Image: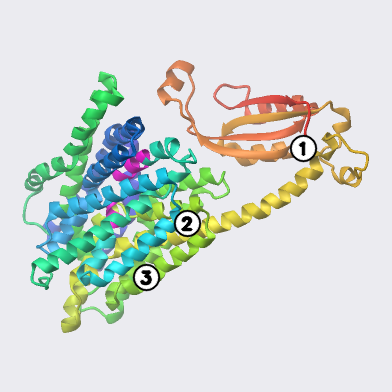
């Protein structure tokens, strides 16, 4: 059952968090009250159950809505309508993000003049405006490198006028806006536009739209901070004590959150209805399924946020303050670096967005970059980013001393990176900081900042200035890591292609008409086609199989003398229910297609090999066919 599977995955992804909580709260610094342990357990269980229901409902309702609307937008044809609805759905999808809701609550606790709902709407509007701009860029085919460079120059130039209390919060807000709800919506819109209205007519233009949209919330919070400061006579009030603990019962918190969660989700459904009635026209059964899925999303988000309010955020703040206890040795606080690194690695490996990114990279590079490679690269990078965030808080160094050099490196790397990997890099920066980050790591850093403020006396920074920023660090690390992988991949591809071109020319010479002045040295060097004198020609082979068989299958084909071998990764597009109910096949989403040229004398031998070694004679294993080639030219 899908719910059980998602529950298991969610629970396993939170085990590292549970281990840290148990070690610190149970052994290092036991809590004084039994009630605190009760709140902690209820908060943890609620976060796991709430996130499970949210993800299950998301897959049945919000994600299909995003895909359907994305495909329907192109029917509007006029660019102005597409850009407007891009803004509207970007705004509405972001307003429903759980990570953003959590961040807004924490920001209001630290600075009460921040209006919780208005904060969410401002960041959502920032996403919406820049989603519209990103779609406009795709339609006008503007260079993605130029756009990113210009946007970040403007962004860092604007910082001069922004209150220091809002700098780190703005970058954190950007990371929190792109999560499980908004990303599929935005990508669906981008795919629909890039496949029909861009000059290239490919989905490559889709990559980068998340990274571009992420700039909007940063600028939006910058302007919000400038306006708040002006409205308060040029001075912002001092930060309040950060205390996520609550005296309310869990049921009371649930009731208080009912309207707020509904306000986040209902607008998405309301705007979806006109598209359903005029463009999409789903069958009644499918339409009801989406509505029921939306109820599951609502219940999951309600339980998730209530669990954080009741006990989960309290645990993060408690752990952050424990290591700053003045009764402990001075070196004890530096153990937070280890805690931050471990949690950064663990949460990254559990983020669904990072998993999706790994799948995308493996497909684009035809398996040359494995999805586990990108996941481990990002996990280690974000572990270091979390560590740097703790260092920043403990030393009270301005966050810009970290962010400016890191973003400068990322922008310089664009010159040496292909546009595709530039888009992927900036997208990955947007998806790395998810709900768990906001739910636990941000309260932890706010707790650390509060502990630092208590011990630093008059030299202490505001909690709002020093406590926020961990999502900012988490968001910038993938920009460098993914571009570095892209540079290495492009360099390897060029080197490999050069060697392949030389080798294939030698290998194919025996099959080509030989001019009078053709040297026989090339033929003598080739051992792979020594049986070609006995064959009448060559066959073009196409083999479709599971990706898991890639290495073994390629080795077997090369042993048979395959040339011009090319592998393409892809995903099945046929509905799983159709495969199972009509054709009786068990769907395998991740597939590969191998194409190569072989002497026709090898056909029977290869057919037997596919049947014996890979069981192609059995159903649901693979497909292979040949096309005879009468003539080759080079």
Q: CA distance from mark 3 to mark 1?
A: 53 Å
* Residue marked by disc 3: 404
State whether residue 537 appears in this view: yes
Q: Nearer the viewer, residue 408 or 196?
A: 196
Q: Nearer the viewer, mark 3 or mark 2?
A: 3
Indicate left or right for 603 with 143 as reference. right
Q: What secondary structure is the stretch in magenta mostly built from?
A: helix
Closer to the camera, 314 or 24?
314
Which residue is denoted by mark 2 in the rendering? Answer: 482
Q: Specify the quadrant that holds the N terminus.
A: top left
Label 3 residue SS:
helix
Q: Is residue 386 left or right of residue 501?
A: left
At x 57%, y 54%, the residue is 489
Q: Mark 1 sits on what residue?
A: 561
Q: Is residue 282 above or below residue 378?
A: above
Other residues around mark 2 within 10 Å, as few (<14) / some (14–19) / many (≥20) = many
Report the magenta residues as a range: 174-189
């Amino acid at each position: 059952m899908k719910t059980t599977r998602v529950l298991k995955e969610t629970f396993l992804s939170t085990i590292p968090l549970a281990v840290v909580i148990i070690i610190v709260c149970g052994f290092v610094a036991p809590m004084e009250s039994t009630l605190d342990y009760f709140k902690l357990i209820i908060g943890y269980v609620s976060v796991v159950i709430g996130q499970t229901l949210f993800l299950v409902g998301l897959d049945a309702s919000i994600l299909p809505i995003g895909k359907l609307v994305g495909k329907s937008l192109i029917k509007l044809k006029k660019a102005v309508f597409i850009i407007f609805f891009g803004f509207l759905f970007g705004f509405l999808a972001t307003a429903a993000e759980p990570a953003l809701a959590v961040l807004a609550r924490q920001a209001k606790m630290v600075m009460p003049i921040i209006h919780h709902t208005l904060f969410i709407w401002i960041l959502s509007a920032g996403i919406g405006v820049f989603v519209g701009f990103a779609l406009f860029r795709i339609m006008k085919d503007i260079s993605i490198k130029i756009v990113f460079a210009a946007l970040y120059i403007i962004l860092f130039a604007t910082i001069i006028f922004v209150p220091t209390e809002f700098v780190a919060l703005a970058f954190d807000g950007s990371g929190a806006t792109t999560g499980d709800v908004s990303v599929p919506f935005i990508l669906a819109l981008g795919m629909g536009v890039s496949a029909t209205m861009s000059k290239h007519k490919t989905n490559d233009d889709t990559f980068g739209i998340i990274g571009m949209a992420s700039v909007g919330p940063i600028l939006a919070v910058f302007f919000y901070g400038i306006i708040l400061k002006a409205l308060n006579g040029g001075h912002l009030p001092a930060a309040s004590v950060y205390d996520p603990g609550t005296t309310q019962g869990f049921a009371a918190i649930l009731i208080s959150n009912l309207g707020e969660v509904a306000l986040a989700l209902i607008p998405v459904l309301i705007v979806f209805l006109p598209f359903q009635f005029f463009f999409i026209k789903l069958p009644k059964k499918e339409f009801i399924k989406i509505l029921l899925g939306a109820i599951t999303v609502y219940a999951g988000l309600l339980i998730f946020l209530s669990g954080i309010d009741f006990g989960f955020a309290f645990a993060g703040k408690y752990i952050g303050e424990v290591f700053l206890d003045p009764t402990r040795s001075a070196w004890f606080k530096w153990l937070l670096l280890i805690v931050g690194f471990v949690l950064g690695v663990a949460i990254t490996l559990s983020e669904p967005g990072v998993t999706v990114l790994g799948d995308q990279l493996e497909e684009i590079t035809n398996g040359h970059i494995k999805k586990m490679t990108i996941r481990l690269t990002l996990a280690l990078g974000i572990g270091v980013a979390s560590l740097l965030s703790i260092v920043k808080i403990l030393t009270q160094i301005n966050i810009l001393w970290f962010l400016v050099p890191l973003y400068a490196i990322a922008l310089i790397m664009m010159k040496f990176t292909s546009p595709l990997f530039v888009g992927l890099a900036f997208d990955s920066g947007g998806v790395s900081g998810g709900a768990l980050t906001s739910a636990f790591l941000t309260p932890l850093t706010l707790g650390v900042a509060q502990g630092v403020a208590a011990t630093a006396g008059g030299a202490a920074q505001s909690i709002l200035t020093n406590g926020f920023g961990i999502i900012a660090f988490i968001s910038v690390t993938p920009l460098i890591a993914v571009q570095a992988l892209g540079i290495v991949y492009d360099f390897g591809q060029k080197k490999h292609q050069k060697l392949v071109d030389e080798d294939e020319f030698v290998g194919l010479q025996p099959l080509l008409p030989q001019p009078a002045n053709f040297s026989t040295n090339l033929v003598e060097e080739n051992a792979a086609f020594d049986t070609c004198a006995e064959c009448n020609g060559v066959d073009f082979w196409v083999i479709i199989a599971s990706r898991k068989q890639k290495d073994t299958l390629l080795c077997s084909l090369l042993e048979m003398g395959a040339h011009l071998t090319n592998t393409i990764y892809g995903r099945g597009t046929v509905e799983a229910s159709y495969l199972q109910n009509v054709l009786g096949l068990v769907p395998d989403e991740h597939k590969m297609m191998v194409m190569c040229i072989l002497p026709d004398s090898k056909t029977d031998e290869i057919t037997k090999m596919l049947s014996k070694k890979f069981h192609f004679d059995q159903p649901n294993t693979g497909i292979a066919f040949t096309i005879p080639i009468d003539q080759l030219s080079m």
